[in-house]
Amino acid sequence: KKKKKRESEKEKKNKFLARACFHPQVYEGFLESNFRDEGTERASANMVVQSRFNKAHNKGGSNNTLVSSAGSSLTIRRRERESTPLVSSPFQQQKSHKTSKRSTLRLRCEPPADREVEVLESETKTENTQKAVHSKGNEVAVQQKEGTESNNEASIWELLKFTVPTMGIWLASPILSLVDATVVGSQSVVELAALTPGTVLVDYLVYVFTFLGIATTNILSVTVAERNGKRTESRLNDALTLASICGLVVGALIFFYNAKLFPLVISTASQELVEPASVYASIRALGIPFALIGMVLQCAFLASKNTRVPLLSTLMGGSANLVGDIVMVNYLGLGIAGAAWATVLSQVLTVVVLASDVRGTFAGMPFKFKAKLPKLSSLLEFLRIAGPVSIILLSKVIVFSVVSLSAANLGPTPSAAHTLLFNVFLFFCVPGDSLNQCAQTFLPPVTGQMRSERKLKNRIILTGNFIGVVNCMLGFLMIFVFPNILTTSEPVIKTLQSVGLILCSILFLHPFGISTEGILMATKQ
C-alpha cells in the first residue's frame, strides 16, 4: 500500500510538472508546493524542471539561466525557511501546503509581472503563519509541562495531610499490642512473657507478606494516577486473591504445627511459656487471612491517596479490640486466649468496613470483586516488586525472631521487659513507616520528572530526620521519667532502664532508614 501510494504521488507530481512547463515562475511555485523535503530531492527536481523546460520550449542558454536563477532563488528562500521550524500541527501543514498549491495554480492565468509578487507574498504569509503557530505551540507545550509537574509535585501540606492519618492507621497495631501486653500482664506475668513467642510466630510471618501491600501500593498508585479503571480493577482483584491464598496457607500451618514448634525454640528453663503461647498462636492463626486481605485493601486506598476509609476502619477495629480485651481478659477471665480472640474479631471487622466501601466504585472508577486466578503477566508484575522486598522483610523477621526467642529463654522477667521494650519500639516506628508509605504513594507518579522527584525525596528525608529526634526524646521520657506507664513491676522497670539508651539511639536512626528504604522501593531500585 505504501509503495502504491508513493507511485501515485510521483505520477501526480509528474503530470502537474508537465502541465506547468510553459513559464519559469510556475516551476518555483511547483517546487515550493510539491518538493518540501531536503536538498537532494529539491536538486533533482530543479534538474527535471530545467530539462523539461528546454524540451518544451526548445530554447537555449538564456532560458536555462532563467530556470537556474528561479531554482537558486527557491533554494535561498528554502534555506531561510529551514532556519524556522515547520508547523507542529498536521492540520496547519496541510493548510500551508494547499495555500502554496493554490498560489501556483493562479500563476498560470495571471500576468507575468504580478506572478512573482504574488508568489513572494504567499510565501511570506505562510512563513509568518508557521512562525506564529510554532511559537504558540512551544509556549503551550512549556505551560502544559510545567502544569503537569506542578500538579504531580506534592506540597508539604499535602504530604502532612497524607502522613498524619497514615500514622493513625499504623499506630493502631502497636497501640493494641501494647494494650494486649498491659491487660494480660495485669493478670499474669507468665502469660505476658508467653505473648513474646506467640506474637513472634504470628505477627512476624504476617509481616513477611507485607510485600503484597507494598506491591499493591506501587502498582495501583500508577494505575490510579493514569485513571486506568480496567487495569486497577484487575490488579486489585489479583492482590486480594494472592492475599487470601497466602493467608489460608500460613494460617493452616501455624494452627496445626505451632504446638510442635514452640518446645523446640523455648528452653527447658521456660517451658511454662509453651502452653499459653500455643493457645495464643492457634487462635490468632484463624485471623491471618483477614489480616492479609485488610492489609491489601488499606494499601489500595492509600495508593489512591484516600486516608479516610483506612483510618475509619482502623478506629473501628481498634475500638473492638480494646473493648474485647477488657471484657474477655478482665471480666470473663479468659487471659491470653481472650486477647487473641479480641484481635481476631477486630481484624474481621476491619475487613468488613474496608470491603463495604469498595462495592461498585474504587477511586472514582467502576470496580467489582472477582474471584479469579491472576494471569502470568500480573504475577510477574507483583514478583518484580515483591522479590527484593520479600528478602528485606525476611531478613528483618529473622533478626527480630532470634532476638525475641533469645529473650524468652532468659526467663519471665527479662522476657516481659523485652516484650514491653519491643512494643515501645514498634510504637515509635509508626511515623517512619508512614513516611515509607508516603514515598511509595507520591513518588511513582512523578518518577522521571527530575525536579519534582528530587524535591519530594529531600522533603521525605528531612522529615525523617526531624521525626528521629522527636522519637528519641519521647522514648527517653517514657523509659526513664514515666516508666509506670508501661509496668508497675520494679524488676521489669530496672531491666527496661538498663538498655534504655540503646533503644533511644535506635529510635533516632529508624525514621531515616525506613524513609530512604521507601524511596528506593518507590523508584524500583
Image: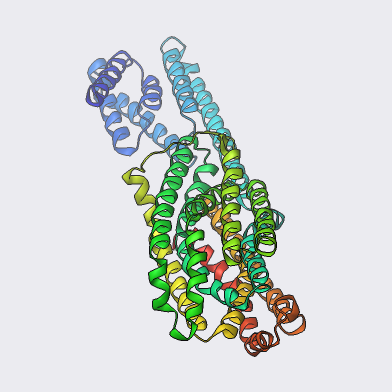
Of 139 and 386, nearer the camera is 386
Looking at the image, is 347 positioned above or below residue 171? above
392 to 88, vertically: above or below? below
Q: Is residue 244 above or below residue 329?
A: above
Residue 198: x and y in percent read 50, 69
Q: Position of residue 377 (x, y in %)?
A: 34, 45
**Residue 221 higher or lower than 513, as above or below:** above
Q: Residue furthest front?
A: 332
In the foreground, 103 or 363: 363
Displayed quadrant of residue 375: top left
96 to the left or right of 43: right
**Which residue is nearer to you in this view: 484 or 173?**
484
Q: Residue furthest top?
A: 109
| Residue placed furthest toward the right | 481
Q: How many numbered dots are placed on residues in this image? A: 0
Name the colouring of the figure.
Answer: rainbow
Q: Residue at x 59, y 39 (%)?
A: 356
Question: Measured from the top left, where is residue 477 in percent x and y?
Answer: 75, 80
Residue occupying the point 40% across, 32% down: 74
Tell me the residue at 42%/60% (across/down). 255
Q: Is residue 26 left or right of residue 190?
A: left
From where the camera sits, is residue 250 visible?
A: yes
- Nearest to the observer: residue 486 or residue 113: 486
**Image location (x, y in percent) of residue 455:** 61, 61
Q: Quadrant of the C terminus?
A: bottom left
Q: Is residue 523 among the parts visible in the rendering?
A: no
